[in-house]
Image: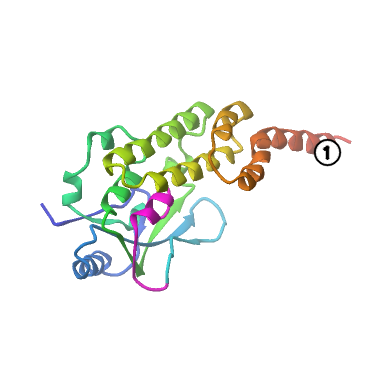
Amino acid sequence: NGAYLAICDGDDYWVSVNKLQAQINKMKKNPDCNISFHSAIGRYEESNRKDKLIAMHDNKDKIFSIEDVIVGLGSFIPTSSIVIKSEIIDTLKEDFFRIESGDYYIQVLASQNGALFIYDLQSVYRMGVLNSWSLMRTSINSILSRKKKSLELFDIFDRVLKYKYGDILDKAKNVYIASIIKDHRLGFKHKYKLYINLKINLFYKIILLPYLFSGLIRVLKYLYIETQSTK
């Protein structure tokens, strides 16, 4: 029944003192914004890798546009940093309950009046944790299924946003397709059709070309190393 809803994944946590009250206070000062967020500390719990700062978009509070959020593909706003007005939940469509990237859907839907970035708050995004999203769905079929569902999301956005952001959604979709092509876990046959239909600048398309064969290159590199080690 509250006016605001805060989101935090089960394997992440908040670290800023009085985070929720501070975040809500700033939202009250920007009443048109239905969502606020902040940066996060990316922490590798199962390795000695150093922490990294995620989504530190500015050195001051700032309102970002829905276009920024769309092109960010879900990573523009750390999920564990989100506070939204509860009324946003009432606007969720049927699509929300069958899509895979629910957090990205909420980000975009809530950002139609802008997304308030708050500079001086933080949370922790734990990476590489057993059973976390980052370690799930690593089989080829699972990866392909997830990617396919994510691509469908752009068409859903276009409909839900009443076809007002077609150009920016096309740009975001192309960025996402490029990320699929760069995924070394997928083979040539999975990438080729996406590559052919990719509508981007020819120069960047040429740059992407080697990634079509990245899986094969990794195999050949491995075989070469194995061959050298047996000599």
Question: Residue 81: where, in percent of width, then height?
Answer: 33, 58
Horizontal arrangement in the rendering, residue 71 relative to residue 109 (left or right): right
Q: Nearer the viewer, residue 131 or 116?
A: 116
Q: Residue at x 61, y 30 (%)?
A: 187
How far from the left and from the top, in percent, is residue 46? 51, 50
Query: Based on the displayed image, in which of its 4 quarters is residue 98 positioned?
Result: top left
The location of residue 132, given as percent across then percent down, is 42, 43
Residue found farthest to the left: 1
Residue to which mark 1 is pinned: 229
Q: 165 or 51, which lies in front?
A: 165
Local crowd size for mark 1, using a 10 Å CA cut-off: few (<14), some (14–19), many (≥20): few
Inspect the image, locate mark 1, and give the three-letter code of the amino acid beneath it.
Ser
The single residue placed furthest to the right in the displayed view is 231
**Image: 61 above or below 201:** below
Element at badge 1?
Answer: helix
Which residue occupies 28% across, 44% down?
161
Taking the image as shown, residue 76 lies to the left or right of residue 111, namely right
Q: Split into 4 quadrants, where in the image is the C terminus?
A: top right
For the record, the magenta segment spans 59-76
Name which residue lies at 52% across and 30% down.
139
Q: Position of residue 172 (x, y in %)?
A: 45, 46
Residue 67 occupies which quadrant of the picture?
A: bottom left
Please count the marks in the image: 1
Can residue 78 be seen in this snapshot? no
